[in-house]
Amino acid sequence: MKETILIVEDDKYILNFITISLKNEAYELCSAKTVKEAIETFYQRNPSVIILDLGLPDGDGIEVIQAIREVSQVPILVVSARQEEAQKIQALDHGADDYVTKPFSMGELMARIRVALRKGSVSLETHEARFEEEWLKVDYTTHQVWVDQTEVHLTPIEFKILKLLVDHRGKVLTHNYILSEVWGYDDEMTHANLRVFMATLRRKIEKEPGNPRFILTEVGVGYRFAG
Ligand code: CA
């Protein structure tokens, strides 16, 4: 069955570029040019992935994310301009999965869509008891973590961060999202504190902490677990 992709974009040139890029890939395509149209088309077509421009004529793409996240976890890939850094982070905080920055290449877009589609199918397998890939094994029931069959000891906070990352693998998690999920809103944790925890976690689970395989940094935005 062909996967349906919804493209929300009011710029004709960019819409054309995305449509042409995806035509060869045998996806079913539909598009919308406004917030209103985007939400309507989402309900009509039930897409597997949504590519979302943030600046729309009748409002902000974030309104689309909010409306859809009330009913669906469909992967949302945000397309943002360089000057929209703050909006991009806001979009991720509201539940977008990933982003590409204009101008982007066809290859970059395709790679992001493939990750999003994979993520969409992973989240259907509910209640996984463990994660295992290459040298890393995580058991959610016993809270144990192994690197190459050797158990490594994580503190409860480190385990919480790791589980959060693994649960959302492929998705960009913003600093604020991780802080609020792990420590709650009212804490005085800062991005700098979080970096320290991430560095420790990398030293424990990565073979080359300086060139991580699993915990990737999204500069200025947050972290992404590549799994
Ligand atoms: Ca626009």
Image (cartoon, grey):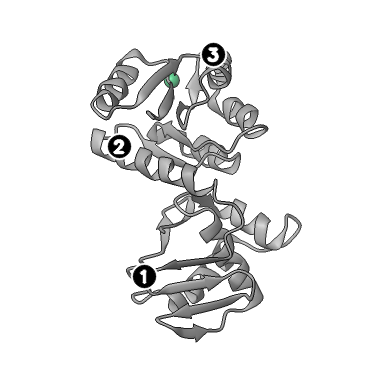
Distance of mark 1 from mark 3, alpha carbons? Answer: 43 Å
78 lies above or below 8: below
Distance of mark 3 from mark 2, alpha carbons? Answer: 24 Å
Q: What residue sits 51% from the left and 83% below the top?
A: 152
Q: Are marks 2 and 1 in contact (CB under 8 Å)?
A: no
Residue designated by label 1: 134
Where is residue 181 drawn, in percent x and y?
66, 56
What is the crowding at mark 1: few (fewer than 14 residues within 10 Å), some, or many (at least 20)? few
Q: What residue sits 42% from the left and 45% below the top?
A: 118
Q: Can residue 202 be seen in this view?
A: no
Q: Quadrant of residue 59?
A: top right
Q: Residue furthest bottom?
A: 150
Mark 2 residue element = helix
Report ligand 1 position as a quadrant.
Answer: top left
Where is residue 72 drawn, in percent x and y?
61, 34
Decide which of 133, 213 is in the foreground and name it: 133
Q: Which residue lies furthest to the front in this view?
A: 1
Q: In the picture provided, is 2 more to the left or to the right than 66?
A: left
180 lies above or below 52: below
**Mark 1: amino acid:** Glu
Residue designated by label 3: 37
Q: What residue sits 64% from the left and 71% below the top?
A: 141
Distance of mark 2 from mark 1, alpha carbons? Answer: 25 Å
Q: In the picture provided, is 10 more to the left or to the right than 46?
A: left
Q: Which mark is residue 110?
A: 2
Q: What residue sits 57% from the left and 15% below the top?
A: 40
Does the beta carbon of the residue at mark 1 sit less than 8 Å from ligand 1? no
Does the beta carbon of the residue at mark 3 sit less than 8 Å from ligand 1? no
What is the crowding at mark 2: few (fewer than 14 residues within 10 Å), some, or many (at least 20)? some
Q: Can residue 85 be seen in this view?
A: yes
What is the crowding at mark 3: few (fewer than 14 residues within 10 Å), some, or many (at least 20)? some
